[in-house]
Amino acid sequence: MNENLKKSEEKYRLICENANDLIAILRIKYTPLFKIPDFLYEYINEAAHKRVLGYSSSDLINKPIQMIIDPRDLEDSIKTFLTVFYLEKGSAELHIKRKDGAFVWLDFQVMVLNEVNGTQKVILIGRDITEKKNLLTELQQKNKELEELSRLRNEFYSGLTHDIRSPLTVIKLSVELLLNSKNLDADQYETLRILQQNSDRLEHLTTELMEYTRLKQGQIHLNATSFRLSEIISQLKLELNPLIQEKGLQIIEQYNPDCELFLDKYQIIKVIRNLFENAIRYSFTKNQIIVTSSTHQNLWTCSIRDFGCGIAPANLENLFMPFTRFPEAKEMHRDGFGIGLMVCKKIIELYAGKIWAESAGLRKGSTFSFQIPLKF
């Protein structure tokens, strides 16, 4: 039995001595009441400790592990270490001082060894994670910088839109007053009409930017009112009638049923208007737009289908990313920054809903749908 025990000890000693990880056994030296006990080194695999930390056995044996923990982190490190110790197993990340004075991060797996005589010792298996920690710190710093850039960008957009809207309002009112004048010849009237159209385009762009910045800054608050989808579609058909007539489109409405909805009408109108107007603009002439709405088990589903330029399958998953415009769409409609669908997605997500697009491919039309739970 003694011979077998010696062989077993020799085998495990060789395993420990040739391991790449740091392996140590600590014994506990209890101190006066209310003081943290010392955890004294009793064994280390010397080769690994020399390679990673520069310490030999003579440097550490019978010395407390506290002497090589970063003094700035000593209290927190020992508290973590004690917590793991009392749980009898766990892990702890400690900032350890090398013999040359440099500091490294070690990830320790901690296990409590209960000996036959009732004493307890601690087995540590440590791995150098300094590079990983440094990369994580660098990433965290980069994230902070990106967050600050994002904040500055949103502030810039917000300030820009407000600065543009004030003079734009004056221009639009002036143009409307001039258009009502009776002393205009044909050329003057046409020039003012073109100016009015471009003012409307600029107003649309600034509104898009304003909605984008509000959503990014979390400034959208939902205020529920009752309405029916048919009311919204009727309103949009009146607003967009010139474009509908120009393309010779037929609007088909299918409600199953046209029930009363209790949501933020203003925000829902923004979503429906964006999807409905896109369907009109990207439809081929002499075609249909189909609006469907249904409620089932407190889930409202709305879809708007067009028979137009369609969407390439590879582009479907990127549709709701900000500032996304695809060549097939630009050919038919050049206005906008490409943030309308992103705004729709953010609004739907405020209701814990989802929005998606389907298309059989280019020139095969597309369907945009969303779902909103009617009870939370």
Image (tube, rainbow, N blue to C red):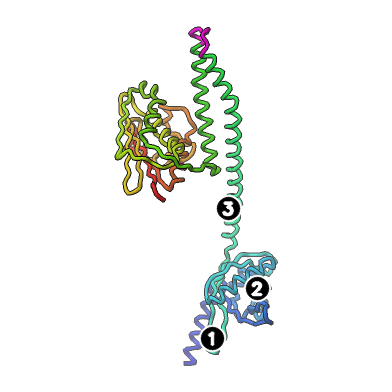
Badges 2 and 3: C-beta atoms under 8 Å apart? Answer: no
- Circle 3 sits on which residue? 139
- Where residue 146 appears, x then y in whole percent? 58, 46
- Circle 2 sits on which residue? 55
Q: Secondary structure at mark 1?
A: loop
Category of crowding for the residue at label 1, using alpha-carbon neighbours closer than 10 angstroms: few (below 14), some (14–19), many (at least 20): few
Query: Foreground residue, 190 or 3?
Result: 190
- Vertical placement of residue 60 versus 148, above or below: below
Dominant SS in magenta: loop
**The residue stretch that appears in magenta:** 180-188
Q: Secondary structure at mark 3?
A: helix
Q: Secondary structure at mark 2?
A: loop
Quarter occupied by residue 83: bottom right
Q: Earlier in the sequence, mark 2 or mark 3?
A: 2
The amino acid pointed to by label 1 is: Glu
Query: Foreground residue, 196 or 64?
Result: 196
Assess whether residue 296 is covered by the magenta stretch: no
